[in-house]
Image (tube, rainbow, N blue to C red):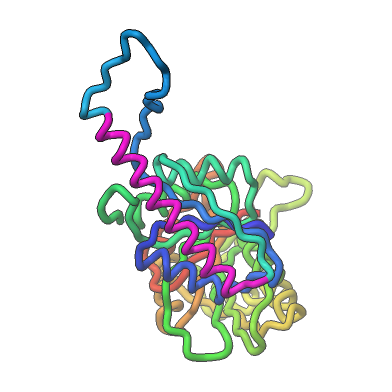
């Protein structure tokens, strides 16, 4: 497994490192820690060339160089610190680091395009080496929208139990099936509990007719007497989780997906919410569905948006 970790030295970033222990990650993995100095690094001043008429370099340009280089050194130092922490938690991991003078979000996205990680981990909020505080955060939000792989928005929680509670938002789309599959493939503590949460209003999409795959079929599920039918639709997914050694149950709620997912996670004490990037009502051209985006921004726990 390849894991790209964005780190900026903030409390949220340190919390994201701690959250790695609760993410079900394998004992053997390859990790890359990225730190960014959010500064423009001007072209190098070549002071070693012996010219009869040396180029005049204004003091302001020299100070800009010094400032940018100092921030890059700080970023490098933070990366080394993060690598040591990760190696302490996962001794078998191969952990490297990369420090750049660049826009943090776009640097992570571009590196992910080249390095092809399975998962990107970022804190919910943080700061760049150069700038002030950001909100979900603009860095986390941009990575969440633009990355081509799964993204974990990590938040610190006080976990005083030897098992975890995982909430998976499900519908009948292939995106939620990918979220279930991702949980099945991880390594979780014994007795870890999983809830598959299906939120209904009046209708729910079901598997398309094989003869007309471009058309979505819907069933009426607004009344509770029809919820057994909904529950049976997700039983195969629950069976996969049980086969992976997890204690899986199916929960059905009526309301708006975002509100119900957040409320269930809060009342149940979920340690992480797993979602697909969009659902049966998503628009294919969107990079991220409104439900996934809103839950990632507002949840009190970690949120992982799974892209197959």
Q: Is residue 88 magenta?
A: yes
User: In this image, 232 relative to 127: left or right?
Assistant: right
> Residue 169, relative to residue 133: is it above or below?
below
Q: Image point 42% across, 47% down: which residue?
A: 36
Q: In the rendered structure, does residue 41 fall within the stretch colored magenta? A: no
In which image quadrant can residue 280 be found? bottom right
**One can see residue 65 in this view:** yes
Residue 193 horizontal/vertical position (percent): 60, 84
**Residue span colored magenta:** 62-91
Q: Main secondary structure of the magenta part?
A: helix
Q: Is residue 206 visible?
A: no
Q: Nearer the viewer, residue 135 or 168?
A: 135
- The image shows residue 101, relative to residue 157, as above or below, that is above
Residue under the point 66% across and 61% down:
94
Q: Is residue 239 left or right of residue 273?
A: right
Give coordinates of residue 206: x percent, y percent.
Answer: 65, 60
Q: Nearer the viewer, residue 114 or 144?
A: 114
Q: How many marks?
A: 0
The quarter of the picture where the N terminus appears is bottom right
**Going by the picture, which residue comes out furthest to the left?**
59
Q: Position of residue 181 (x, y in %)?
A: 69, 66
Quarter of the image for residue 234 reads: bottom right
If the image is split into quadrants, where does the C terminus sit?
Answer: bottom right
Q: Residue at x 38, y 52 (%)?
A: 74
At horizontal 46% and vertical 43% (from top left) the residue drawn is 100
For the residue pair 38 and 228, the one nearer the viewer reads as 38
Task: Tell me where residue 191 appears, x and y as whole percent.
Answer: 64, 89
């Amino acid at each position: 497994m390849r894991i790209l970790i964005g780190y900026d030295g903030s409390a949220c970033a340190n919390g994201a490192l701690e959250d790695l222990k609760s993410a079900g990650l394998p004992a053997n993995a390859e990790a890359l820690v990225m730190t960014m100095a959010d500064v423009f690094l001007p072209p190098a001043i070549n002071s070693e060339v012996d010219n009869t008429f040396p180029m005049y370099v204004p003091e302001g340009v020299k100070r800009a160089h010094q400032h940018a280089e100092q921030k890059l050194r700080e970023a490098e130092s933070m990366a080394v610190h993060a690598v040591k922490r990760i190696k302490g938690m996962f001794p078998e991991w191969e952990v490297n680091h990369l420090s750049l003078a660049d826009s943090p979000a776009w640097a992570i996205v571009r590196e992910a395009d080249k390095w092809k990680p399975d998962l990107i981990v970022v804190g919910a909020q943080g700061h760049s080496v150069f700038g002030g505080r950001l909100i979900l955060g603009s860095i986390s939000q941009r990575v969440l929208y633009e990355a081509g792989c799964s993204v974990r928005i990590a938040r610190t929680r006080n976990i005083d139990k030897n098992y975890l509670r995982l909430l998976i938002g499900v519908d009948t789309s292939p995106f939620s099936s990918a979220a279930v599959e991702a949980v099945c493939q991880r390594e979780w503590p014994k007795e870890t509990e999983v809830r598959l949460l299906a939120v209904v209003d009046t209708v729910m999409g079901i598997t398309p007719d094989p003869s007309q795959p471009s058309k979505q079929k819907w069933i009426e599920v607004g009344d509770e007497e029809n919820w057994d039918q909904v529950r049976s639709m997700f039983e195969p997914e629950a069976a996969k989780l049980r086969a992976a050694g997890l204690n899986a149950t199916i929960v059905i709620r009526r309301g708006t997906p975002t509100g119900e997912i957040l409320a269930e996670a809060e009342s149940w004490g979920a340690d992480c919410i797993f979602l697909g990037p969009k659902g049966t009502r998503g628009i294919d051209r969107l990079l991220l569905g409104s439900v996934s985006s809103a839950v990632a921004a507002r949840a009190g726990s970690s949120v992982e948006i799974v892209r197959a």
